[in-house]
Image: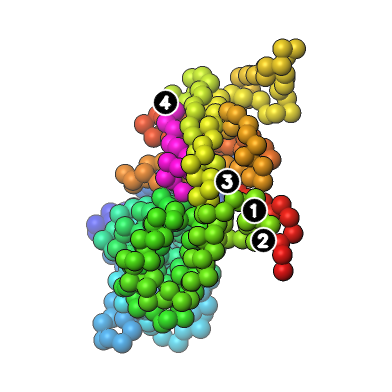
């Protein structure tokens, strides 16, 4: 008679269970499903959850265990003892398979760091049951164990968990720590996800406790990017000033960081204030004096005149994605699958002080079902654009200037559309679409979006939250003088 789990599992049941596991649960983290042809009208009886419960009991009770895991915390006398089964360990981890083949005793001595030793029982339970509960503060430790013992399914699942919880609140923050860990481990997916989150949500990162912990390498990586999304360049300077005050890096690091600020994107009255009120700028003024002088020239001269003498395509004259009203506008589209919508807004003609008072009016058109340009009817006999809509189309957005002006000479406008989403209760930038400078629309806009689904990651309370940014770029019209 087979005894219940509470009474203990006989050896022959344990072995049979483990053999069944080979066919029905996992092979080193990858799902395995037996292809068994069924007779017509046959029904599949699925008792997999019962199987998981039996495996969990097998681990908890240690019945028929043939190996003892002694998990020692490095630099301590603390040892955690786990009664395990060789078949399960070798089935799930090639590292355990190698260790078990080479062992000389009935136990394996495993040395782990304190954080990994604290979650080792969770890790082993995953090998038996295929599921695991994870907190933010446990993710890195479990990822280390999954990587060390080559449990690839768990490693990939934890990477996915971390990329999906970048916006979660934690007491001291975690995105920068996860980025540093991913860089160390060579986890490219996690590294790029963290870097993208930091770049797209930099204003909120500035306000978090973890901003002061950012490494110099990551700081300089961010400072070089033109796709940063933040309120203004002034906000970036003030955040940099706070980071330097907290970390007190060497002078060469400070000066290199200050040189990466795009002073041409800061209005002159703010530059004057910084010169008088910023202790950081006063202390290192000599190292950035030429950049400030160039910025003041940029704001005072006509861009066309400036382009005769300077390369206006360099970074100091290149905007980032600024959210302030001078550079674009938010746009909330309620019930985005219903019909076409239009919206008008204004931006400054260019970042130069010479052009900042000049305004460009923009028209934005959103359609939930719009054919690509190549399939549209373009103009009627009267010269008006004839839109072509169809149920087979997909969401499109078109952004065009409402008027033309001679002032546009030497300026091109790069357009960026951001889609906001709510993640873990926080509004974050989830998707970014960039327009080619010569086009009026983003070809891949919402190409994978399911706007019909209320829980879509592209929607907030059934509405599409967009922010359109216009980045004016000046062109060098004549060869710069040497």
Say if residue 85 shows up in the picture: no
**Who's the residue at 68% across and 17% down the image?**
384
**Who's the residue at 70% across and 28% down the image?**
373
Q: Nearer the viewer, mark 1 or mark 3?
A: 1
Name the spot of residue 79 as percent of width and height, x first: 28, 81
Mark 4 lies on a secondary structure that is: strand
Mark 1 neighbour class, 10 Å CA radius: few under 14, some 14 to 19, many 20 or more: few
Mark 3 lies on a secondary structure that is: strand
Name the spot of residue 348 as percent of width and height, x first: 50, 41
Say if residue 61 shows up in the picture: yes
As drawn, 220 above or below 419:
below
Q: Check disc 4 and report the residue beneath it.
A: 334
Q: Check disc 3 and report the residue beneath it.
A: 472
Q: Check disc 1 and report the residue beneath it.
A: 305
Say which mark, if any, is on residue 19: none
Mark 2 lies on a secondary structure that is: loop
Residue interval drawn in magenta = 321-333
């Amino acid at each position: 008679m087979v005894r219940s789990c509470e009474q203990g599992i006989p050896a022959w049941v344990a072995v049979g269970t483990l053999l069944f596991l080979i066919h029905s649960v996992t092979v080193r983290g990858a799902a395995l499903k037996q292809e068994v042809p069924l007779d017509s009208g046959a029904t599949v009886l699925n008792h997999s959850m019962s199987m998981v419960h039996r495996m969990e009991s097998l681990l908890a009770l240690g019945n028929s265990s043939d190996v003892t895991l002694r998990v020692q915390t490095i630099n301590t006398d603390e040892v955690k003892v786990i009664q395990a089964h060789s078949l399960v360990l070798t089935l799930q981890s090639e590292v355990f398979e190698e260790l078990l083949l080479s062992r000389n005793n009935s136990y394996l001595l495993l040395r782990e760091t304190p954080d990994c030793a604290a979650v080792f029982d969770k890790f082993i339970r995953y090998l038996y049951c295929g599921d695991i509960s994870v907190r933010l503060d446990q993710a890195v430790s479990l990822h280390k164990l999954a990587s060390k013992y080559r449990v690839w399914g768990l490693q990939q699942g934890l990477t996915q968990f971390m990329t999906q919880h970048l916006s979660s609140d934690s007491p001291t923050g975690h995105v920068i720590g996860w980025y540093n860990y991913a860089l160390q481990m060579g986890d490219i997916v996690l590294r790029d996800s963290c870097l993208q989150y930091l770049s797209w949500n930099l204003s909120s990162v500035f306000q978090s406790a973890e901003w002061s912990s950012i490494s110099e390498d990551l700081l300089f990586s961010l400072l070089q990017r033109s796709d940063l999304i933040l309120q203004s360049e002034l906000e970036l300077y003030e955040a940099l000033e706070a980071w330097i005050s907290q970390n007190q890096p060497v002078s060469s690091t400070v000066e290199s960081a200050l040189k990466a600020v795009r002073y041409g994107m800061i209005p002159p009255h703010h530059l004057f204030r910084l010169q008088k009120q910023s202790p950081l700028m006063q202390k290192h003024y000599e190292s950035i004096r030429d950049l400030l002088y160039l910025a003041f020239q940029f704001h005072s001269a006509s861009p066309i005149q400036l382009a005769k003498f300077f390369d206006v395509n360099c970074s100091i004259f290149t905007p980032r994605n600024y959210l302030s009203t001078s550079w674009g506008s938010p746009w909330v589209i309620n019930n985005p699958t219903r019909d076409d919508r239009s919206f008008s807004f204004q931006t400054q003609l260019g970042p130069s002080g010479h052009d900042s008072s000049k305004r460009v009016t923009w028209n934005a058109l959103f359609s939930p079902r719009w054919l690509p340009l190549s399939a549209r009817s373009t103009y009627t006999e009267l010269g008006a654009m004839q839109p072509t809509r169809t149920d087979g189309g997909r969401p499109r957005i078109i952004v065009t200037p409402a008027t033309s002006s001679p002032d546009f000479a030497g300026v091109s406008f790069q357009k960026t559309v951001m889609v906001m989403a709510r993640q873990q209760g926080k509004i974050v930038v989830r998707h970014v679409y960039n327009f080619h400078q010569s086009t009026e629309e983003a070809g891949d806009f919402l190409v994978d979006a399911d706007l019909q689904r209320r829980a879509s990651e592209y929607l907030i309370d059934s509405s599409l939250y967009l922010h359109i940014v216009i980045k004016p770029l000046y062109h060098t019209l004549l060869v710069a003088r040497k």
